[in-house]
Image: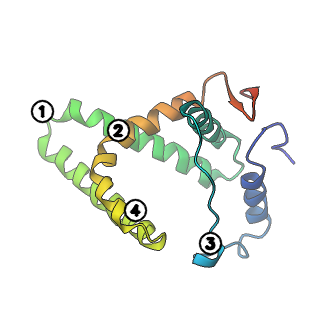
Amino acid sequence: MGSEHIPSGDDEFLMHKIAQQFPEKVHFLKSQSVLVSTQPNATFAEFFHQRKRWASKWEHYENHFAKMLAIFIFLVNVATLMLPIWFFEKTWIVFSLLAFKFVAEFVFLTCILNFFKQKWLALWIPILFVLYPSYAVFFALAGRSKGYQWKNRYYERT
């Protein structure tokens, strides 16, 4: 109940509802035996609309922690993009914040890459560290736009 008007994400919203109903019973299962893989988007347009669709869901979450986490991630990425403006005035603070963010993300991502047996992808982390804030902010804002296309249909944002 409550997310029927959203054209995608039924699995995600169902999981949120189950976790709300049985908070002590829902846990992350970190096991290679339950991994599922899917094919990537065939075109850039599909990729673009998928990311817009994903970015538009956060405001429909009933879980306040999930909503606050989405807002926090957005604000951290906006702040990261703003750091060059503060660079000349507070150089040591900017370097400290960037170093802390890089180390935290590097540790987190290398743990994930190790689990997925993709350690070699850690070589991309420094490049993505620079590019990701623009990507995240762009799609967060794009998710607020009028609508998106999915499965050959156009959906207006609700």
Mark 4 is on which residue type?
Leu
Q: Could you tell me how far apart the alpha carbons at marks 2 and 1 are, in whole angstroms?
A: 16 Å
Q: How many marks?
A: 4
Measured along the vertical axis of the image, is residue 127 above or below residue 46?
Answer: below
Judged left or right of residue 130, residue 51 is right
> Depth check: 117 or 115 in front?
117
Image position of 114 with respect to 131: above or below: below
| Residue bearing mark 1 | 88
| 13 or 90: nearer the viewer | 13
Q: Position of residue 18 (x, y in %)?
A: 78, 64
* Marked residue nearer the N-terminal end (2 or 3): 3
In screen coordinates, is 98 left or right of 60? Answer: left
Q: Residues within 10 Å of mark 1 (few under 14, many from 20)?
A: few
For the residues labelled 4 and 3, say whether their Cβ atoms are less than 8 Å apart. Answer: no
- Provide the secondary structure element on which disc 3 rests: loop
- Residue 39: image location, x then y, percent: 61, 52
Query: Image point 32% across, 35% down: which residue?
Result: 81
27 vs 83: above or below:
below
Residue 101 in view: no
Mark 2 closeness class: few <14, some 14–19, many ≥20 residues within 10 Å: few
Circle 3: is it few (<14), some (14-19), or many (20+) Cα within 10 Å?
Answer: few
Residue located beneath label 4 in the image = 109
Distance from disc 1 to disc 3, alpha carbons, whole Å, reads 43 Å
Q: Which mark is residue 28?
A: 3
Look at mark 2 in the image and give the residue it sits on.
79
Disc with the residue nearer the chain's start (4 vs 2): 2
Q: Which mark is residue 103?
A: none
Identified at 22% across, 33% down, the residue is 84
The span from disc 1 to disc 4 (Cα, nearest Å) is 30 Å
